[in-house]
Amino acid sequence: MAKIYIKYTPVKAGLTGAEFLAPFLDEHFNGITFTGIVSDDMNHYGYLEGTGDLLSKALMSISGRFSVKILTEDDIIGFSQALYNPIDPIDGTAETLVQFLGGHGITVTSELDSVKAMRKTLFKEITKRKFDDYNDLIADLAKSVILLTQHYGDLTGEDLTNVDANITTMKSIYDQATCISAFDKMVTNLSSILSGYYTAVTNLENAADIDAANAVTYE
């Protein structure tokens, strides 16, 4: 069963009401659940659980409706550190953050590292809005790759000077350590996420009939 950490925002209903994610899933996607962990009243943080095509359909349905954003486990720990408000029970003492998150199957290795991860996520929300449309970014990236791999050897004069200056600028933004870290993260994500996806795709391509194709599952 897949476990996906998310943030969502309830949908306004009427003048004072709100539609929450868990009841919506119960009504329309029985078998897919949302478990809340913490909330700042406007935004709710927790995790979806489910399997197969139903999970895919649920994600497609709720992404826009509830402004869903996928988070990492570190993000969830970081937001929980900021929002968790322990309440002392009648007998005994309130759970610590580590105990509270342990009840959700989340192991806290370093609260500080998780807070840093959460803060980076918040920073990225601002940064992403400052860039052009993603389609334009992808097109510019493709053009840059072609420039450096196919046209660089033909550059002369002012063009060569300009491109080299831009490369120097890029190296100052993305130093060697940053690039190595990004490469490591990419490989880790590809290994952990896409290996199962491509296994499912291979099984799907090898399916001999519609029943066999429909029987292939991912997650």
Image: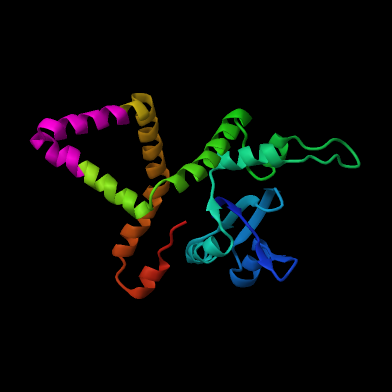
Q: Is residue 185 visible?
A: yes
Q: Quadrant of residue 210?
A: bottom left
Q: Quadrant of residue 172?
A: top left
Q: Main secondary structure of the magenta part?
A: helix
Residue interval drawn in magenta: 146-170
Vertical arrangement, residue 51 with respect to residue 73, above or below? below
Answer with left or right where residue 13 lies relative to residue 7: right
- 47 vs 136, nearest the viewer: 136
Q: Position of residue 61 (x, y in %)?
A: 53, 67
Q: Is residue 2 visible?
A: no
Is the image coloured rainbow, by chain, by secondary structure, or in one colour?
rainbow
- 27 vs 127, nearest the viewer: 127
> Magenta stretch: residue 171 in it?
no
Vertical arrangement, residue 162 with respect to residue 27, above or below? above
Which residue is painted at 38% across and 39% down in the image? 186
Q: Position of residue 67 (x, y in %)?
A: 56, 58
Answer with left or right where residue 53 lies relative to residue 153: right
